[in-house]
Image: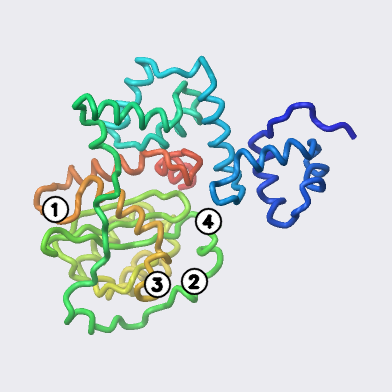
Amino acid sequence: MKHKKYNHLSKVERYQLSVLLKTENNIACIAKQLNVHRSTLYREVKRNSKPRGSYDAFYANETSEIRKERFSKRRKLNLEMISFIRDKLENQQWSPEQIKGYCNKNNIPMVSHERIYQYIYQDKADSGNLYKHLRTGNNKYKKRYGKHKNRKIVIKNKVSIDERPDIINNKQRYGDWEIDTIVGKEHKGAIVTLVERKSNFILIRKLKSKNAAHLATETIRLLAPYKYLVHSITSDNGVEFAKHEYISKKLNAEFYFAHPYSSWERGLNEYSNKLIRQYIPKKTNFDDYNTMDILTINDKLNNRPRKLLNFEKPIDIFFNNF
């Protein structure tokens, strides 16, 4: 059997290689399975592995594309690209990686995300403000559960996340949600956030208070239009979720509670809250944001291409499966 003549792997072959490397250490054997020369695989693993040595197909593809772009004369930053970059940064707060990923997916000419960062920081050096639209990570968010006295409140009839079935844990269907709240300055005001686990589609609404009954009412109102895509909800142990049985009954959905102090069990919701904090920083007075402001933020987040979704937009994925 003749091996393929080219020396670079395709995207599909990189994903195959990534899987095979987890079960097979012999490069020569893998080369036979992929029908490529073993030297191609040795070179691929050496050039495109992560800094610590592990091989990941997505990382390898990105690294390869950046390298191609670096040596390509055709991909130079031009006025059309600059206009696109500025629009997505200033109006939608997309990250450079999201801009690049979206352009790749839609065959729009664009320089690498590294080059976009260079342009942004050159703009900063020239007294521009593009950098202010980046998510810098300065707004660190830590979940608080309320005053000490509230922590003594026991939520009745909780169902542990340990009982959540694999179909939810493995994101095998649409309609499984995570719920959380973020609070305003001096713990005044709150926002409820709901995110669908498979599509990353998010819903946010300003609350008058974190009262459990009020939160339950607003949660039902938010999810009612999508009732046929609400199979389960998972929350933390905040006392604002004490009316979980009422929510469960009205939406005909299962309600699960993560373990205390285990935010990684609702990682998508925690990440989504950080995205919201880009628009509503910590220690912000929520009275400064009206309903239209919240809806605008909600819309921007759902229209961002996500790396996790292969640079699809959450709103497109969700409604294509609604």
Q: Residue at x 36, y 37 (%)?
A: 95
Q: Residue at x 35, y 43 (%)?
A: 302
The reply to whether discs 1 and 2 touch (Cβ–Cβ < 8 Å) is no
Kind of element beneath mark 2 = loop
- Of the image marks 1 and 2, the number of the one nearer the N terminus: 2
259 above or below 58?
A: below
Give the number of the disc on residue 284.
1
The reply to whether discs 4 and 2 touch (Cβ–Cβ < 8 Å) is no
For badge 3, the amino acid type reads Ala
Q: At which x and y percent is residue 169?
A: 51, 64
Q: At which x and y percent is residue 120?
A: 30, 29
Say which of 13 and 171 sits in front: 13
Give the number of the disc on residue 258.
3
How crowded is the residue under tag 3: few (<14 C-alpha within 10 Å), some, or many (20+)?
Answer: many
Q: Which residue is mark 4?
A: 173
For badge 2, the amino acid type reads Arg
Kind of element beneath mark 1 = loop
How crowded is the residue under tag 4: few (<14 C-alpha within 10 Å), some, or many (20+)?
Answer: some
